[in-house]
Image (cartoon, rainbow, N blue to C red):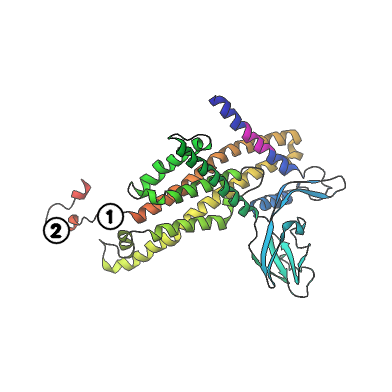
Amino acid sequence: MMIAKKSIKFLAILAIVFSSFTAFAGGGGSSEKEGQVNTPEKIKGYIKHHLADSHDFTLFSYTNDAGERKHVGFPLPVIVWTSNGLKTFMSSAFHHNDDGTVVVEKGDVKLVKIHSKIYELNEGETTVSFDESHHATNAHRVLDFSITKSVFGMLLAGLLMLLGFGALARGYKKGAIPTGVGRVLEPLVLYVRDEIAKPNIGEKKYKKFMPYLLTVFFFIWILNLLGLTPIGFNVTGQIAVTVCLALFTAIIYLTNGSKDFWEHTLWMPGVPKILRPILAVIELVGFVLIKPFSLLVRLFANITAGHFVVMSLIALMITMKESFGPVASTGMSFVLATFIMIIEVLVAFLQAFIFTMLSALFIGMAVEEHDHDHAHNAEGTGNEDTRFI
């Protein structure tokens, strides 16, 4: 039974990799057809587009016999605040164009999309003008509240968490041992409690922070797994998302810091008073800036690098086709991408674990109650080194 389950998991990974291949190579073939991903420059642009957020979902693209580029996917709601108020419409109005060539008119406002950002044309303008760096010179950014691909991914992850934890709660109402989805989630919940929360926060105070730790663990883990599918999610690879997660952790441990924590941070005992203000600045910078920065950069960099490596290995079948032939280059690319994809499944869990572990560690440092034993400072007692016993 265990062998069968492992085989199913392995076949699922192969299916994901194969689907990624077909999505990537959908533009392959003759270089005469417009829009095909068959040159190093286009490959770099494709990978960059995959890593960035988007206002619509494109599952795959192809070029028909007439040379027209077709996209298969679905649009998402565009919600922007312009100089003439709130404007809403579906992203399909841009017709999958990202170069500012399609102008969407909403009342007296003309909107264009350039590099996944929505701009409003200045009054009286009908087309976008660009400078040498391809920056719009006659348009300005608008406040964008759209349901982008990353926002959709977060909503989907939240829905899956509600369904999963709801099933776990209903399972506990029926008996001590949950069934169905709850049986899968229970070991992970116990793992977060016993291996992350209790050791880092302590037996007395860990329960208060369990809801946050469970939420951030499953939120990151689910989004990381969704990012391995051909759907194209890269939510935890968006710097804005990791910044928000790190800020949540920082706010929690700073607002729940104990009296001892703030005393040791702002006026550290046991050191000369002249040095205490300097140490206070260093400690504040560490807790307010450095620790959240380490959280957000670690998650962002690892997930982005993983996506970049997988897409680059898949691209080998295109870049090495002339040197090794289509069969050899495709086989080599498939084997390497499959190997990295298996590793990425582990990384998806590992990054969720690391972020949750460090969050629990920082919270534990803030809520810890210190023992004030100054006996080692007594002079002439002969017990100066008893603290090492």
Give the extent of the magenta segment.
11-18
Tell me whether circle 2 and circle 1 mark residues in contact (CB < 8 Å): no
Q: Locate residue 188, reporting x and y percent.
A: 47, 39
The reply to whether residue 136 is visible in this rendering is no
Q: Which residue is mark 1?
A: 370
Quick one: label 2 or label 1, which is nearer the N terminus? 1
- Neighbour class for label 1 at 10 Å: few (<14), some, many (≥20)? few
Label 1: element kind:
loop
Q: Amino acid at mark 2?
A: Glu
Q: Which residue is mark 2?
A: 379
Instruction: Specify whether 352 is left or right of 237.
Output: left
Q: Observer-nearest residue: 170 or 364?
A: 170
Q: Observer-nearest residue: 362 or 33?
A: 362
Q: Observer-nearest residue: 131 or 179?
A: 179
Q: Locate residue 384, reporting x and y percent.
A: 17, 53
Q: Is residue 27 magenta?
A: no
Q: Observer-nearest residue: 276 or 145?
A: 145
Residue at position x 35%, y 50% in the image: 205
Rendered position, 182 above or below 383: above
Q: Is residue 17 magenta?
A: yes
Q: CA distance from mark 2 to mark 1?
A: 23 Å
Instruction: Specify whether 308 is left or right of 98.
Output: left
Q: Amino acid at mark 1?
A: His
Q: Kindly identify which numbered label has been placed on residue 288.
A: none
Label 2: element kind:
loop
Instruction: Count the marks.
Output: 2
Instruction: Specify whether 19 is left or right of 351.
Output: right
